[in-house]
Image (cartoon, rainbow, N blue to C red):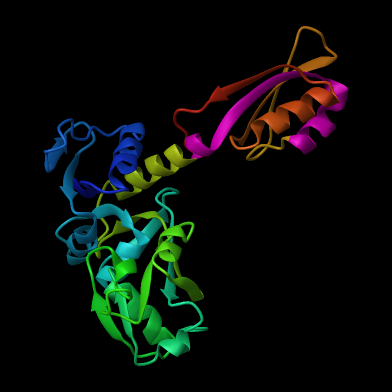
Amino acid sequence: MLRIAVPNKGSLADTAADMLAEAGYTGRRDPKDLHVIDPQNDVEFFYLRPKDIATYVGSGALDVGITGRDLLLDARMPGAQEVEALGFGGSTFRFAGPPGRFDSVTDLQGMRVATAYPGLVDGFLDEHGVAVDLVPLDGAVESAVRLGVADAVADVVSTGTTLRQAGLEIFGPVILESEAVLIAGPDEKDGTETLLRRLRGVMVARRFVLVDYDLPAALLDQATAVAPGIESPTISPLRDPEWVAVRVMVPRHGVNRVMDELYAIGARAILVTAIHAARL
């Protein structure tokens, strides 16, 4: 039975649970449940703190898990490896300090740097040959400079508004571009490939839609240039031998532009259908 670690709370929890449900797995119904068995799919779900998932998977106590790339790197568990990026929970990590005080990461040499991700930041600074005094905090990192416990901070940045409100400015390179990832432990377990294939199918279903349309056969080359599909469109004959029916997968983002261009070429009866599951 495949043992899967899932975030029990936080920004990744709901989307991870939804993704697993779309992949055909039966998870918890009560948010208080910490352990659920799905006998039909031969898996067990363990709902854990996101920061702990890499530790459980890396130690071999659990087989696979969903967590953030930032949390995986912060845990520094050599047994836990990223298998697949899952396309949600994106975040960016940057350094910030008082305006005009720092220009590059080398300016942090010997300084105090506050962060909620000491393992991640320490690894990044080691790669750049910079030694600092790390100040681990559990939250509200942006207040550390104002309160005098740090000279700079390393934190998640979205728009930068929170850091600016704290009187800080971003400097130096991007520490990490993070998102939710599927991770696996040191030993490959039966069921891992099935889980991965299903999650990939969910990501395809979320990114693409099916477009069906009718078109004069003479215009196929022009239409295919607009919407070539993953491999190639499916072409079916119609009762009128001069027309064909076309089905093609196109990215969900921008589908209306594709419809407009197909219509301008001569396509008619253009229909868009959501994809609920896929295997490519």
> Residue at the location (17% across, 46% down)?
47
Task: Kindly identify the residue that appears in the image at 20 percent across and 46 percent down.
Answer: 8
The span shown in magenta is 204-226
Residue 219 is inside the magenta segment: yes
* x 37%, y 86%: residue: 126
Q: Does the magenta stretch include residue 183?
A: no
Q: Which quadrant of the structure image shows residue 18? A: top left
Relative side of 245 to 15, left or right: right
The answer to whether residue 242 is above or below residue 100 is: above
Q: Can residue 71 be seen in this view?
A: yes
Residue 249 % position (x, y): 62, 32
Nearer the observer, 81 or 126: 126
Q: In this view, does 216 lie above or below 84?
A: above
Residue lying furthest right in this view? 218
In the foreground, 127 or 20: 127
Quarter that holds the N terminus: top left
Looking at the image, can residue 174 be seen?
Answer: no
Q: In this view, does 250 lie to the left or right of 264?
A: left
x then y, percent, for residue 5: 21, 50
Give residue 95's quadrant in the image: bottom left
Left or right: residue 152 versus residue 187 is right
Prevailing secondary structure class for the magenta stretch in the rendered image: helix
* Towards the viewer: 107 or 32: 107
In the image, farthest residue toward the top = 239
Quadrant position of residue 124: bottom left
- Check the image and report above or below for 239 versus 87: above
**x and y percentages locating residue 276 in the rendered image:** 45, 28
Residue 134 position, x and y percent, is: 27, 81
